[in-house]
Image (tube, rainbow, N blue to C red):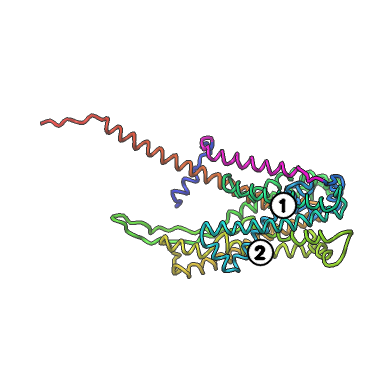
Amino acid sequence: MASAAEQLASNISWANFGRAKELQQRIFYTFLLLCVFRLGTYIPVPGIDGARLSEFFTQYGAGFGDMINMFTGGALQQAAIFSLGIMPYISASIIMQLLTSVMPSLEALKKEGEPGRKKVNQYTRYLTVILALFQAYAWASVMESQGMAVEPGLMFKVGAVVTWVGGTMFLMWLGEQITARGIGNGVSLIIFVGIVANLPGGIARFFEASASNDTGFLPMLMILLLIIGLIAFIVFVERAMRKVIVQYQRRQVGNKIYGGENSHLPIKLNPAGVIPAIFATSVLVLPVTFASARLEGGETGIMGTILAYLGNGQPGFYILFAFLIVFFAYFYTLNVAFKTDDAADNLKKHGGFVPGIRPGARTAEFLEYVTKRVLVAGSIYLVIVCVFPSILQNLYSVPVVLQGTSLLIVVSVTMDTVSQIQSHLLAYQYEGLLEKSKLRGKDRAKARRRAPKKRVKR
């Protein structure tokens, strides 16, 4: 039987959206900041030869360059001020989370509550600046070596590096503002908008390439049906969960008895969402970026070998991509998304327990056991969605924005944002019910006071 909260959530009235002024302000604020991001993807860095830049991406941009360009919303292809995108901040977050799990000092700092969390975020920002400096210098060196700089030299590199690092820090601030004062996760929404903005052009290029290569109508129709089926598969799996039965002890407070009911603890099949795919791509960006900075005039060697084996479409790329997705699926879930120790402590504090399992450490071990086995299916699902559809790019020239990673991000972020909007509407509807009940109570009290008292006959 559904709980009262679930019944209320199922009866959400979207007609209340017009009266939820705070929700409207949050959505408008998010839309405004995302428009600022899109505007920045069209403002180029001074000193770039646009014709040479376009020629370079037409010749060498296919493959991994398209993937990086997708995550920056097309800013890299235009050498815009947001060319680095939000990827340095994501890379810094990955490194800090890894360090937090292996360094006791950082782990203790994170457990200090809000002050410790602010300190860790400060370290993450410092590391973002360092990574952005390296990546900006790498791209400036590539552009200078390929003849895309109008006046190559020290001033060009300094100007490009300062502009790109500043753009990344501004995007990081935008993401934090959207998360705090808007709707949804700011970083995910920035990547989401970049992918959606490239969808029309990607679809047009797909049909154009299919027509020029004489692919035929039937293969093209099969690919479109596969994309639609992939979207439905993502929606189905993202909603799938494993329910762990939880019972609550009965306790008596005065003359009333609380607890004793059964509930469940939901563990999603993919608790980490789109984070493993984004993290894996962010990690793959670093070696390719540094290797590209060292390649001047077709230099071979170790750096050339890195680019050859990590190029999109190569077996080494798929193997490393799949390994990173599985690693981050386990790491992010067990350390951030669903901490079994915290879940066991919360159950114990509220008098809940799993039937047949002792509360405390044994419950944490059981939840970790269940979560790891659920993640087997979840990580395989992520690998299937993100890695295997990429093979279509080499066979039928499918653009990156129509591949599994981009579709996973678009569908998951859309579902998460809609869920947050529903949560705000649910809270607004609940507050409205409370206000109505209070008004009814006041009206009844006034009616009692106004009612004439019956005279008692003596």
- Give the percent coordinates (x, y) of residue 361: 48, 70
Please identify the quarter of the rendering in which residue 348 is found.
bottom left
Q: Which residue is mark 1?
A: 165
At horizontal 40% and vertical 37% (from top left) the residue drawn is 436
Please name whichever residue, 147 or 251, is drawn nearer the observer in this view of the structure.
Answer: 147
At horizontal 72% and vertical 55% (from top left) the residue drawn is 132
At horizontal 51% and vertical 65% (from top left) the residue drawn is 341
Q: CA distance from mark 1 to mark 2?
A: 30 Å
Q: Does residue 45 belong to the magenta stretch? A: yes
**Left or right: 91 in relation to 290:** left
Please name whichever residue, 110 or 274, is drawn nearer the observer in this view of the structure.
Answer: 110
- Give the percent coordinates (x, y) of residue 199: 73, 45
Q: Does residue 30 belong to the magenta stretch? A: yes
- Give the percent coordinates (x, y) of residue 238: 60, 54
Q: Amino acid at mark 1?
A: Val
Eyeballing the image, is 357 above or below 425?
below
Q: Nearer the viewer, mark 1 or mark 2?
A: 1
**Does the magenta stretch mainly form a helix, a strand or a loop?**
helix
Q: Which residue is mark 2?
A: 326
Q: Which mark is residue 67?
A: none
Please say whether residue 245 is visible from this viewpoint: yes
Crowd rating for badge 1 (residues with CA inside 10 Å; few <14, some 14–19, many 20+): many
Residue bounds of the magenta highlight: 18-46
Please identify the quarter of the rendering in which residue 432 is found.
top left
- Secondary structure found at label 2: helix
